[in-house]
Image (cartoon, helix red, strand yellow):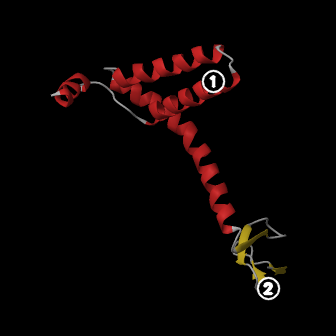
Amino acid sequence: MILNWLRRFMAGRYGFDQLSFALLLLYMVLILVTRITRFWPLQFAALALLGWCLFRMLSRNPQNRWKENQKFLTFWHPVKNWFTHRAQHARACKTYRFFKCPHCKQKMRAPKGKGKIRVTCSRCQHVFLKKT
């Protein structure tokens, strides 16, 4: 019964998306920082973020909310990809040695523990020696 009421209430409304999730997450971080530092003006900023998140979720204008989310995603995807790349690189550092071609600066990798190897750059075909 309550679930049916919620479905009827949310019919025609925008709902939850990536921007709403980011706003909710930022709200929780600000509340935590407010509790730790006891700097109460941050609580108003946190409540404003929560209000914006609820406004977006309950909005009956999905076109505008979708546009807002797309703008957020154009900002967020490069940030997310940067962190993902750093995490993958950190995991790969355990088994690979990374270096750059001295000629064209192309990034390359080779398995660790192979001693001195002869490397041919895939971009400029420059051959050089590297220790792994």
Q: Which amino acid does label 1 sit on?
A: Arg
84 and 67: which one is in front? 84
23 and 37: which one is in front? 37
Mark 1 neighbour class, 10 Å CA radius: few under 14, some 14 to 19, many 20 or more = few
Query: Residue 59, relative to residue 102: is it above or below?
Result: above
20 and 71: which one is in front? 20
* Residue at the image position 23 percent from the left and 26 percent from the top: 6
Quadrant of image for the C terminus: bottom right
What residue sits right under mark 1 in the picture? 35
Quadrant of image for the N terminus: top left
Residue 44 in percent (x, y) is at 58, 14
Residue 122 in percent (x, y) is at 69, 75
Residue 64 in percent (x, y) is at 40, 24
- Check disc 1 and report its element: helix, strand or loop: helix
Residue 94 is labelled as: none
The quadrant in which residue 53 appears is top left
- Check disc 2 and report its element: helix, strand or loop: strand
- Give the left or right position of residue 110, taking residue 31 as reference: right
Residue 100 in percent (x, y) is at 79, 68
What residue sits right under mark 2 in the picture? 117
Query: Residue 125, relative to residue 92: is it above or below?
Result: below
